[in-house]
Image: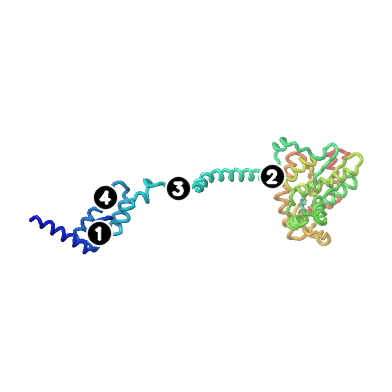
Amino acid sequence: MSTTPAVSARQAWRQLMRAGARVSGGPTLPTRQQPQHQLRQCQAAFARQASSLAASTSRRATARFSSSSSSSSSSVLRQPLARRTYSSGPKPPPRTSGNQQIKFWPFLIVIAMGSGGYMLLVSRRKDMPPNADSKAGSDATPAFSPDDVTVLFVLGGPGAGKGTQCARLVRDYGFTHLSAGDLLRAEQERPGSQYGQLIKDCIRNGEIVPMEVTIALLENAMRATLDKTADKKARFLIDGFPRKMDQALKFEEVVCPAKLVLFYDCPEAVMEGRLLERGKTSGRADDNAESIRKRFRTFVETSMPVVRHYEAEGRVVKVDATPPPDHVYSDTREKLRKALGDKF
Ligand code: UDP
Ligand code: MG
């Protein structure tokens, strides 16, 4: 009776040895060669271990574990699941550079937005015509005093006859005639001028040359005239300028306030006829049908607001420029006498 268990044990040992299982040393691994009951024992043990681990980890970890709890799950068990995937394991080394990037980005964005906004403000202010406030606040003094220098702006559409009337006023009253268009054409032809091409393009397209160029040319010409006089006094007819509000305000702010505006009013159809006639001999790049059309548009859209601005201030002397030149001239003299006195 007492040997039976020993025989059974020996038989079991042999069976195990035959099956190639290791009795001592390492963990018993469930293999296909193991006897069926041992395999079941191992699987039960694995299942117990699995359920205790699963209880201490998340549902997802449990699902992963269960799905791999066959033969290949042994290595998974030897290496605790949570250590590989979850925070209970050793923490990974800190990613210093990544953390720094995340901390610095908001500052960089704030600095970039601030700088961009500032540059936008500066560039917009540069294009803005100075308003009454900025003029009052600025310490810019005009280059010439109206006590020494008299300025009359002469305005009117292209072909209204400004040049013709100015020549007569020069002859009879000693004005100095400065045509903005003539000054620009001279600058365009001056060898080495950095504005030559720009002026050429603007004139052909009936567009207005940037005011800095025109104002600088006018101021230089005025200074050259004054330098030649003994008493440093002079009277100027500034013809074809200002053609835009910003030019008007800037000129009066930095060069000299104007006494009044002489405005030659003329219908487009009359002006067009004169310009096409003049174009036969003038050699001007803008005395052609296409340029004339563009010049009319610029005059209506951009230059007429200047006339209206001065009209609202009561500084405009308006003359009908439709009749022949002599008629227009006598009308001009009469109106200027009324505005400036007999000895203007
Ligand atoms: N121009 C300009 N700014 C001025 C005056 C003239 O840009 O203050 C340019 C503009 O392209 C204009 C051209 O010069 O169309 C010719 O001007 P001008 O006064 O000679 O023409 P007008 O009006 O006498 O026909
Ligand atoms: Mg002219």
- Ranked by sequence position, the earlier of labels 3 and 2 is 3
Q: Amino acid at mark 4?
A: Ser
Q: Earlier in the sequence, mark 2 or mark 4?
A: 4
Where is residue 305? Give x, y as percent. Answer: 71, 46
Vertical position of residue 344 compared to residue 299: above or below: above
- Find the distance from the CA under tag 2 to the CA under tag 4: 76 Å
- Residue 126, numbered label: 2
Residue at mark 4: 51
Quadrant occupied by the N terminus: bottom left
Q: How crowded is the residue under tag 2: few (<14 C-alpha within 10 Å), some, or many (20+)?
A: few
Q: Earlier in the sequence, mark 1 or mark 3?
A: 1
Given this view, does label 4 or label 1 mark the residue nearer the observer? Answer: 1
Q: Earlier in the sequence, mark 4 or mark 1?
A: 1
Kindly report the distance in space between the C-alpha atoms of the residues bearing marks 4 and 1: 26 Å
SS state under label 4? helix
Q: Nearer the viewer, mark 3 or mark 2?
A: 3
Callout 3 amino acid: Pro
- Which residue is situated farthest in the left direction here? 1
Measured in 3D between alpha carbons, the distance from the residue under mark 3 to the one under mark 2, in whole angstroms, is 53 Å
Measuring from the top left, give residue 339's x and y in whole percent.
82, 39
Residue at numbered disc 3: 93
* Residue at mark 1: 22
